[in-house]
Amino acid sequence: MPSLATLTPREPQHLNMDIDKKTLGYCSNGNLKSRFQYKFAQPANTEELCFEEMSQWSQSLERLLSSKYGMKIFQAFLKSEFSDENLEFWVVCEDYKKIKSSFRMSSRAKKIFKCYIQAEAPREINIDHKTREVIRTNIKVPSAVCFDDAQRIVFGLMEKDSYPRFLKSDVYRTLLDSTSEPMRM
């Protein structure tokens, strides 16, 4: 399973873009596509978004997730579909693997389980019962790999479902078309 730790981020040479809820217009009316178009039509003092960077996102989910900006745009797309829990879980697991303190690891493992794994969790991910029970056992003595099975399943779900929808989405197509020629962000 690819992870951010093993992927080499390929930051574009001339991209300086921060996308957050405010940037995407979550407080504004209108759909996500129109909010992207509005934001990208506004003059700004940032650098250009390059076509090469965005076109590489279509090569694989790994490429998309290794791009700071690609991941943010993908996350915004998933939020617009009310299906961002898988990506959120995947990112939380990547951060969890970096924890060195056994106390912090234990505490975080319990929080991850309560939020994403247990039945009826607030951000419950779609995994099978067997994987859920293995994780329940694993977090009793947590390690950096106790969520790997669930993370692998979630990555597969995103790769087969969310990622292809993203590539076909108006949001991605509009951004890609807009960057065929350099676009001011």
Image (tube, rainbow, N blue to C red):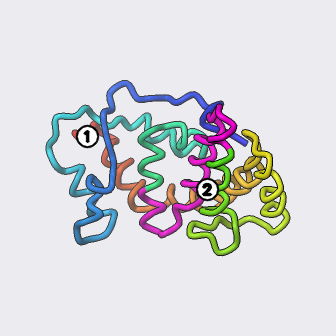
Q: Is the magenta stretch mostly helix, strand or loop?
A: helix
Nearer mark to the viewer, of 1 and 2: 2
Outermost residue to the left: 43
Q: What residue type is labelled 2?
A: Lys
User: Badge 2 is on which residue?
Assistant: 111
1 and 2 marks in contact (CB < 8 Å)? no
Q: Is residue 88 magenta?
A: yes
Residue numbers of the magenta segment: 76-105
Say which quadrant the N terminus sits in.
top right
Which badge, 1 or 2, comes first in the chain's sequence?
2
Identify which residue is drawn at 65% across, 75% down.
Answer: 120
Q: Residue 98: say if magenta.
A: yes
Q: Distance between the residues labelled 1 and 2?
A: 41 Å
Q: Is 144 in front, or is 19?
A: 144
Q: Is residue 157 above or below residue 94?
A: below
Residue sticking out furthest to the top: 13
Nearest the viewer among 145 and 101 is 101
Q: Where is residue 94 in the image (x, y as percent from the top left)?
A: 61, 41
Q: Where is residue 12 in the image (x, y as percent from the top left)?
A: 40, 29
Amino acid marked by disc 1? Met
Percent position of residue 117, x then y: 68, 63
Between 84 and 93, the one nearer to me in the picture:
93
User: Is 161 placed left or right of 180 in the picture?
Assistant: right
Query: Which SS class for mark 1?
Result: strand
Q: Name the residue under label 1.
A: 183
